[in-house]
Image (tube, rainbow, N blue to C red):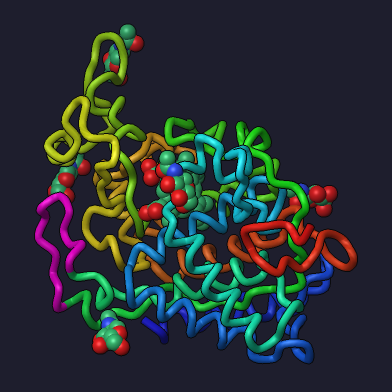
Amino acid sequence: MWNLWLPWLLLSAVWMAAASGEDGLRPDFYGSACPNVEAIVRDAVRRKLNQTVVTVPATLRLFFHDCFVQGCDASVMIASARDDAEKDAPDNLSLAGDGFDTVIKAKQAVEAQCPGVVSCADILAIAARDVVVLVSPLFSSSLLPILGFAVVYTCLLFKSGGPKFTVELGRRDGLVSQAALVADHLPGSDFNLDRLVSLFRLNNLTASDMIALSGAHTVGFSHCHRFSSRLYAFNSTTAVDPSLNATYAKALMRACPRNVDPTIAVNMDLYTPVTFDNVYYRNLINGEGLFTSDEVLFTDIRSRPTVEQFAADQAAFFGAFSSAMLRLGRLGVKTGSQGEIRRDCTAFNN
Ligand code: HEM
Ligand SMILES: *[C@@H]1O[C@H](CO)[C@@H](O)[C@H](O)[C@H]1NC(C)=O
Ligand SMILES: *[C@@H]1O[C@H](CO)[C@@H](O)[C@H](O)[C@H]1NC(C)=O
Ligand SMILES: *[C@@H]1O[C@H](CO)[C@@H](O)[C@H](O)[C@H]1NC(C)=O
Ligand SMILES: *[C@@H]1O[C@H](CO)[C@@H](O)[C@H](O)[C@H]1NC(C)=O
Ligand SMILES: CC(=O)N[C@H]1CO[C@H](CO)[C@@H](O)[C@@H]1O
């Protein structure tokens, strides 16, 4: 694998070197104030990952939700006594607690060595990169396979994680976190291509960035209600979404019967749910994308060529994912004297 995506790494490194400085972010921002910050965060992430593999999807999704609402400023981390902060919005209620816990633990480790200098927003950005790099089926066994499909363990065991990429730093933590600001800023699982493309474009991300970032659904879970209309209520004459693979639809109905316990969740990548790979795109080609917003990337002929490319070429996916994460990480950032460096990621300093 490494030899395959090495050229992409080099390419994106060159591109990043040329691009950094924009927004005031740069990879060596803490070079003198906290030179070991990346190693400290990586160790904390590794320890958390050793406790639960849910750390991976939870942290990655937390970063996405943070950046799309008010920018990458850790506003999603704020806990409000009145339950009206960003994380209390309906869209955020399904954010798994392990993502929050990862950032809190990493922040504690960083504060012990470099008090008061590293923002929670940067720690979340580093942790979101690290979970992609560190994810390994070795951390998982009990989770496979949720839907009862056979998985070739021996093959998985020797596979490493996802792409390694450089993270730009220098973000400051935001001073605003409101549940009311979340609505309309996050995509819905029922979105069609036009809605996906226009929401990502508002966030300075291209259609191909959007397709690459959707590949994050190669890990993690979804609750049944996010896709149950595809199984039971597609339209007034047809119950099952015709773009769903029939075998997959039956398996999903077994896992998610009508009126299922709302806490039940299924793997989003049927075959390799704890490996960061391009199987997500192969699933789309087979009609095995879980959400309307996933499957539409294949059924819409405008995005299909990119799906086919990523399905055939994991290096291409890794390269596109890395550069899209870089651009995601630049959204609405506060730098210089804006915002603050939070002491406790879940509370404003004052
Ligand atoms: C393209 C539009 C997207 C839509 C419509 C979407 C929607 C969703 C939904 C509905 C869930 C399931 C939540 C639940 O029921 O628990 C989910 C999970 C997830 N999403 Fe997305 N998402 C999108 C893009 C992204 C992006 C850009 C990322 C990160 C780069 C991402 C990362 C994840 C991860 C890792 C999970 C699993 C969470 C877990 O297991 O805790 N998603 N997404
Ligand atoms: C997690 O840590 C424990 C104790 O240090 C160790 O025995 C175990 O092998 C680790 N598990 C993984 C999956 O790394
Ligand atoms: C429901 O969807 C099916 C399959 O796409 C289609 O043939 C049918 O015309 C749709 N019915 C209505 C009422 O839209
Ligand atoms: C449905 O999924 C099975 C198993 O992956 C696959 O062999 C088959 O080709 C898929 N059917 C369609 C229509 O894509
Ligand atoms: C998108 O880019 C424009 C131009 O650089 C910038 O003004 C705007 O703030 C960016 N949007 C976000 C959400 O970062
Ligand atoms: C209803 C619900 O799931 N609430 C959760 C919202 O997110 C926080 C932080 O992870 C959880 O503690 C809540 O249980």
Which quadrant holds the N terminus?
Answer: bottom left
Residue 320 rendering spot, x and y as whole percentages:
54, 63
Q: Please tell me which residue lies in front, 313 or 275.
A: 275
Front one among 73 and 153: 73
Magenta-drawn segment: 142-154
- Which residue lies at the image location 35% right of the left edge and 59% below the top edge? 219
Magenta stretch encompasses residue 115 = no
Judge whether residue 214 can be spotted in this image.
no
Specify whether 309 is left or right of 116. Answer: left
Q: Quadrant of residue 25?
A: bottom right
Q: Is residue 42 above or below residue 233?
A: below
Seen at 55% across and 41% down, the residue is 88
Ligand 4: image quarter: top left
Q: How many marks?
A: 0
Q: Is residue 250 above or below residue 327?
A: above
- Give the farthest residue toward the top: 236
Q: Tell me where residue 262 appears, x and y as whole percent.
A: 28, 35
Q: Picture coordinates of residue 346 (x, y %)?
A: 62, 58
Give the quarter of the figure containing the C terminus: bottom right
Overall secondary structure of the magenta section: loop
Residue 254's spot in the image, x, y percent?
12, 37
Q: Looking at the image, which residue is at 67% across and 43% down?
A: 201
Which quadrant of the view contains residue 3? Answer: bottom left
Please say if 240 is above or below 256. above
| Residue 327 visible in the picture | yes
Q: Residue at x 34, y 80 (%)?
A: 160
Q: Give the quadrant of residue 173.
A: bottom right
